[in-house]
Amino acid sequence: MPASSGMADLPVTAQIANALPMPVIVVGPGLEIVFVNPAAEQFFSTGAGLLSKQTLRDLIPFGSPVLQLVSQAIERRASVGERHVDLSTPRHGEHVADITVSPLIEPDGAVVITLQERSLAQRIDKQLIARGAVRSLHGMASVLAHEIKNPLAGIRGAAQLIEEQLPPNERELTQLILDEADRIRGLIDRMESFGDTRSFPRAPVNIHEVLDRVRRVAESSFARNVKFVEQFDPSLPRVSGDRDQLIQVFLNLVRNAADALPEQGGEITLTTGYRPGVKFGAAVAGERLSLPLEVTVRDNGAGIPSDLMPYIFDPFVTTKRGGSGLGLALVAKIIGDHGGVIECDSVPRRTIFKILLPKAVIGPEESKNA
């Protein structure tokens, strides 16, 4: 939408704005929201109808420089901008964006705001770096496997021999030794899995079948009292990946969500959507990633402590008593191995894990059988 356009021209130029991949917001002289494009609806996780009933102040955090940018654009009658502006709010989630504000000729005081989100691109780069760091655990795990597993087996065997010579009512300490030995071995096994760089067979996977399987497993075991809500895009293309690994990913996310829910009124929402035409630059990879398939797992639990949010995908970070802290790290690794990205936004009573995945390229013969 050119800065010279008046608001009377909005219905014509709206088609152009709607086609743009970045969020576009038209703000009136009283800071009322006049128009938003679909990218802005997605950015704020709110429909155009609700956004049109709000003002710009409702969308930005207190103390944000956005209002000052609006004033400068109107005063100078020229476009102004600022990079890396924090737009995070409890209602609309965590966002960092480059902002450009351009004045409209009429009515006086109206502006067009365009946003270029940076937070997701930064997370992509961070996850690409983290993947290399996580795989370095493989070297440490290999050392542990050699230096600990062998003597651990001896300790466990000795404990079993001692236990056989004790009456049943005196085996509490030997059982403790056996349990702890098994726990340590399991931890080392999980650490070794991070270094598995072997390629895996890929095939077009229907993500809805994966989510349905996960829901049925959850409802029959650890989430019997949880209400599941499914909001699926029936036309969603398939993802190229490994079905069993994707089941593991979403089973882990749903289990974490269920663990965080209150005893009554717990709800988990599974959502899928297709976001075509948007690519993200990843400086570390030296390429642009096209990740149009979006899957979200949302719960109304207690939320993740804010001080842990920057580290939740790092190994050994956990909020669970007795947890290993490897679950989400393994989830991030699997998603990364599929060429995707995972991100999280959490406030009390609303935690959302968003997974972005590339779609499968299906040949003519596969299309007939899909």
Image (tube, helix red, strand yellow):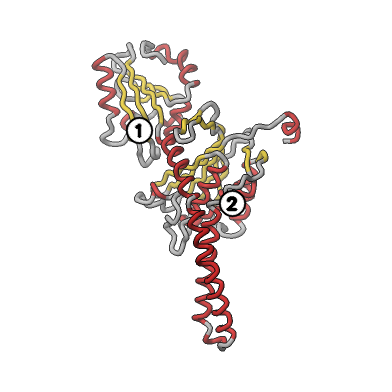
Pointer 2 local density, CA inside 10 Å: few below 14, some 14–19, many at least 20: some
Residue 46, by quadrant, is: top left
What kind of residue is marked 2?
Gln
Mark earlier in primary sequence (1, 2): 1
Q: Residue at x 57, y 51 (%)?
A: 196
Q: In the rendered view, would you say 306 is above or below 359?
A: below
Percent across and percent down for residue 65 are 27, 30
Position of 34 compared to 249: left or right? Answer: left
Say whether residue 239 is left or right of residue 306. Answer: right
Q: Which x, y percent locates residue 95?
A: 38, 36
x and y, in percent, of residue 98 in the image: 36, 28
**The one of 139 and 323 positioned closer to us in this rendering:** 139
Residue 239, horizontal then vertical, whole percent: 62, 38
Q: Is mark 1 in CB contact (under 8 Å) with mark 2?
A: no
Q: Amino acid at mark 1?
A: Leu
Give the answer, above or below, for where 83 lies relative to 252: above
Say which residue appears at 34% left-offset and 50% top-offset: 307
> Number of callouts in the render?
2
The mark found on residue 59 in the picture is: 1
In what quadrant of the picture does the N terminus appear? top left
Q: How dense is the environment of label 1, judged by Cα within 10 Å: few (below 14), some, or many (20 and up)?
A: some
Task: From the viewer's side, name the closer residue of 89 and 134.
Answer: 134
Task: Find numbered disc 1 in the image and state the secondary structure of the residue it sits on.
Answer: helix
Q: Classify the position of the C terminus by image quarter.
A: top right
57 w.r.t. 94: above or below: above
Mark 1 vs mark 2, CA separation in Å = 36 Å
Question: What residue does disc 2 label?
Answer: 248
Residue depth check, mark 1 versus mark 2: number of the one nearer the observer:
2
Q: Quadrant of residue 67?
A: top left
Report the side of 209 relative to 119 (left or right).
right
Q: Which mark is residue 337?
A: none
SS state under label 2: helix
